[in-house]
Image: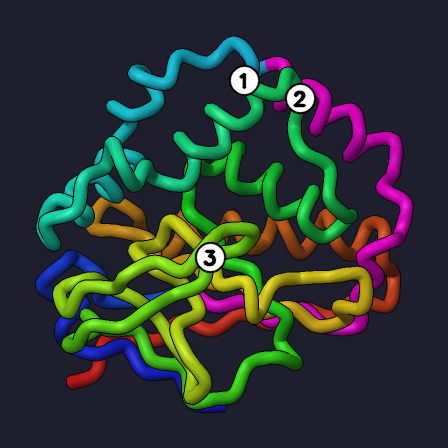
Amino acid sequence: MEIIVDKSMAALGITDVVIGIARHLNPNAPLGEAFEQKLCEKEQWALQADADDIARNPVVAGYTEMLGKVGRSAKKNPPTILALLKNIQRRGNIPRVNSIVDIYNFAALQSLLAIGAHDFRKVAFPLSFAVCGKEDTFLPIASTAKHVAETDFIYRDTQGIMAWLDVRDSEHYKLDEHTQDVLFVIQGNAQTSVAMRLDALACIEADLKACMPLATFETQVVHVAG
């Protein structure tokens, strides 16, 4: 399983990418009472959160800075946590998809990190993180195709782009009711330590194992190519 972080990412402040691989999952497993309680509390926090205050948090500001470095507008392409908060406040609740998605959405709200989640069995390694270097197209989940500029940062496998600007994941790798193994990706930014990102994965691991006792979880830290 080869994963490459191209040196073009270092100029954007990314010197390490943190990866989690979860196996033997059940997206339909019931979530426990303790998780439901903390998710409810996080939902209330999200409904009352001030997006401008959240945007000033160093973690979120780090994503905005990355977008600016490649000439992309954070207003048109808001960092993941801001887009999730807007969706929750518009809906009046946290979107419930399945147990795996609910768990990593909670982790995203808790940490403010952008967390990619992809069906591991749909990924064709090697996986590479880089500034795209050419014009391309990308199909986000539940959306229409988007133009990818040569200066956009992405990660991709041998089949195509899996995530774009760390704000959208691809439709082709999304989790569904048959997903058993998941690749979690926390690319981060210049303001997010490896330890912080590993802590977020540890929270995901604990919540998955609490409701899916057969689950296994491993992490990797991939350094930028020399």
Q: Amino acid at mark 1?
A: Gln
- Report the residue marked by disc 1: 89
Q: Is residue 67 magenta?
A: no
Q: Quadrant of residue 194?
A: bottom left
Local packing at callout 1 (Cα closer than 10 Å; few below 14, some 14-19, many 20+) is some
Q: Quadrant of residue 226?
A: bottom left
Whole-Å distance between the Cαs marked 3 and 2?
22 Å
Considering only vertical position in the picture, is 218 above or below 74?
below
Q: What label does residue 159 carry, if any?
A: none
Considering only vertical position in the picture, is 98 above or below 154?
above
- Report the residue marked by disc 2: 93
- In the image, the segment drawn in magenta is 18-44
- Report the residue marked by disc 3: 140
Q: Nearer the viewer, residue 135 or 179?
A: 135
Q: Amino acid at mark 2?
A: Asn
Rendered location of residue 215, percent (x, y): 79, 66
- Helix, strand or loop at label 3? It is loop
Mark 2 or mark 3, which is nearer the start of the sequence? 2
Whole-Å distance between the Cαs marked 2 and 1?
7 Å
Q: Are marks 3 and 2 in contact (CB under 8 Å)?
A: no
Rendered location of residue 126, percent (x, y): 42, 89
- Helix, strand or loop at label 2? It is loop
Q: Quadrant of residue 64?
A: top left
